Amino acid sequence: MHRGHDHEFPSEQNGGAAGIGHNNPAPRAAQWQTPHRDDGGQADELPAKAERDLDLVEAAFTEGFLSASDPTSFLRLAQVPFETMMEEKRLVLLRVEVDAVADVGGITPHLGGTSFRYDPLPAAMVSRRKRLRFVYFDGAGPRSLTLEEVRALVT
């Protein structure tokens, strides 16, 4: 008897081979971190992953765009829309921005969150990257989109 109810133990059901979980003779592995849906049920499959190696695609795009003799043709070749619709608004491409970013310091918040510690990074830990943005005008103001968002407009 266990908390007011009986169990058949694995040794009684399948020759002593204990299963995974609470007296469960199931022969397959259990996944305890199963994602849940908003309606409370179990998710049957994981959400679709983002495009594979998009960071490498973005780096190659940036490199090619910066060295292109004709940036407009490069954008056409890459299927970046000059005019498109998003959320029932007309978007027109104004510019492509490539920012060089270098992280030269790090912060660590103190307990309580009202102060922090700052440490400059040594040269070997400085990270450099380029950030790519597509700036569209939506009729009211500029809207900055990532390559992933722009590629989703095309499909």
Image: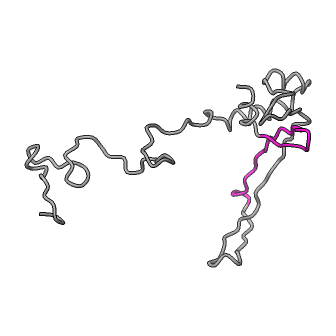
* Residue plotted at (86% across, 33% down): 91
Q: Is residue 38 above or below residue 56?
A: below
* Residue plotted at (71% across, 78% down): 115
Q: Name the quarter where the C terminus is drawn.
A: top right
Q: Is residue 132 above or below residue 126?
A: above
Is 54 left or right of 16, judged from the image as shown?
Answer: right
Is 7 left or right of 147, judged from the image as shown?
Answer: left
Nearer to us in this view, 129 or 7: 7
Give the number of marks.
0
Q: Is residue 46 above or below residue 76?
A: below
Residue 46 x/y as whole percent: 49, 39
Q: Magenta residues: mostly which secondary structure?
A: strand
* Residue plotted at (49% across, 46% down): 37
Residue 78 x/y as whole percent: 78, 24
Residue 93 x/y as whole percent: 88, 33
Please check the rendered image and state whether residue 147 is part of the magenta-colored stretch, yes or no: no
Residue 131 x/y as whole percent: 79, 44
Q: Which residues are magenta?
A: 123-145
Nearer to us in this view, 130 or 89: 89
Residue 96 figure quarter: top right
* Residue plotted at (30% across, 44% down): 29
Is 2 left or right of 145, judged from the image as shown?
Answer: left
Nearer to us in this view, 21 or 61: 21
Q: Name the quarter where the N terminus is drawn.
A: bottom left
